[in-house]
Amino acid sequence: MSKPPKSEEGGAKTAVDEAFAFDPTDPAKAKDLDHMARIRREKPVCRPTENLVLTTKYDDTRLGFRDSKRYSSVGDMRAPGVVVPEEESFLGEIDAPLHPKIRRILIKNFTRSGATRAEAWTRAEVRRRLAGIVDRGVGDLMGDFAIPLPGSVSAHVLGIPDELHDPVMEWCNELLHSSWPTTGKTDRGEGIELSFPELTACLDGLIRDREQAGAAAPDDLLSLMVNSRGDDGWSIGNHHVRTLVVNILSGSLSASYMLGNLLYRLLSDEHFESALRGDAKSIEKSVDESLRLEAPVAFLMRTAREDGQIGGCPVHKGEHIMLHIAAANRDGEVYPDPDSFRLDRVDPAEHLSFGLGPHICLGNHLTRMIGRVVLEEMLEVLDSATIALQRGFEWECVDHLQEYGPESLPVEVKR
């Protein structure tokens, strides 16, 4: 009996499941929820291409997030073989021991009470941006509202001056949709500093201000990152602070697509508005139900540290695991009527849209607050104005590998 072929890491190489094969770098294929539903029914953990294991059921995906010792986050968003310096790494692609050291600092601001502190500013900003669209009579609820808003809230929490929010988010949006996330460089150069010099200059100036101010620095997240010291004198380091600021700002774009999904539902489903108005708790429920059903980040990646198995499928050291959040969130064994948007779910299992375990999204409280405030303020606007999607509008998913939500939401307003 012949031995199975070896992978590059030295372990046994397992054949691709041809019946379920797809290109994981093709956004349309990676976010094809019908195909993922078929895989979940027929072979919930499979190998859709070489050196990649896909999970589509809730329990297997949950395990992949929780077991950070076996499944590493390093290189989560990078192309195969791309390694970036530690100080150019986002928090989600760092493992212990550095990850918990940084997280212990950031978590001081990313709390439920921290989100509450940001609510008044957020509500005023939501009103300001919505008023601009209403006054003009036309607008794009994505480009004019949902895309800039969460980043602006994050910028406020960081302590970035209001007048810099829009340009900073434009640079971050450019960065997120460039080659930097996968390769660590662009045609302008390697690293954030050379790839995005305007963004670098802006953030480095703010970091220097906090460093020079020391104990007199403003009480904000940026000051916390710059001036915090561990018992051993360890600090994050200004280069990495810059990367983490970019991480926090660009990471807020997933909240943008959550808002897009909610706003599209509000404008396209006549029953949704009445449901929101009919139950005081329905707004908070709707934010989480949208996050479950329309996960704004469809999947995340991990890398196996050792040979093993998940859901009965062999996993070899060095192989990638595609933890498909959107598929797992629609697991019928966990959520009855999983493909429907329902506000009558009783104590549903925690969805996986924020991840789970050591790398659970720090911004989950802030994201939920933003979603709730936006719906509350939209209902206020709809008391005195009619907002409708422009005639002929067709929903189109954003052209991004992992993000799920509308590319645009052009609207007309009548008062």
Image: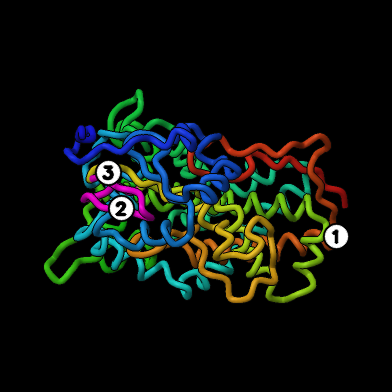
Magenta stretch: residue 313 in it?
A: yes
Q: What residue type is labelled 2?
A: Gln
Per the image, label 2 sits on a secondary structure element best described as strand
- Check the picture and name the quadrant holding the N terminus: top left
- Left or right? Give the position of 391 relative to 103: right
Per the model, the C-alpha gap separating discs 1 and 2 is 57 Å
Magenta stretch: residue 332 in it?
A: no
Q: Residues within 10 Å of mark 3 (few under 14, many from 20)?
A: many
81 is higher (above) or lower (below) than 40: above
Per the model, the C-alpha gap separating discs 3 and 1 is 48 Å
- Left or right? Give the position of 59 relative to 308: right
The residue depicted at 75 percent of the width and 55 percent of the height is 266
Residue at the disc numbered 1: 384
Q: Residue 88 carries which label?
A: 3
Label count reads 3
Q: Which amino acid does label 1 sit on?
A: Ser
Q: Residue 233 carries which label?
A: none
Residue at the disc numbered 2: 309
Residues in magenta? Answer: 302-316
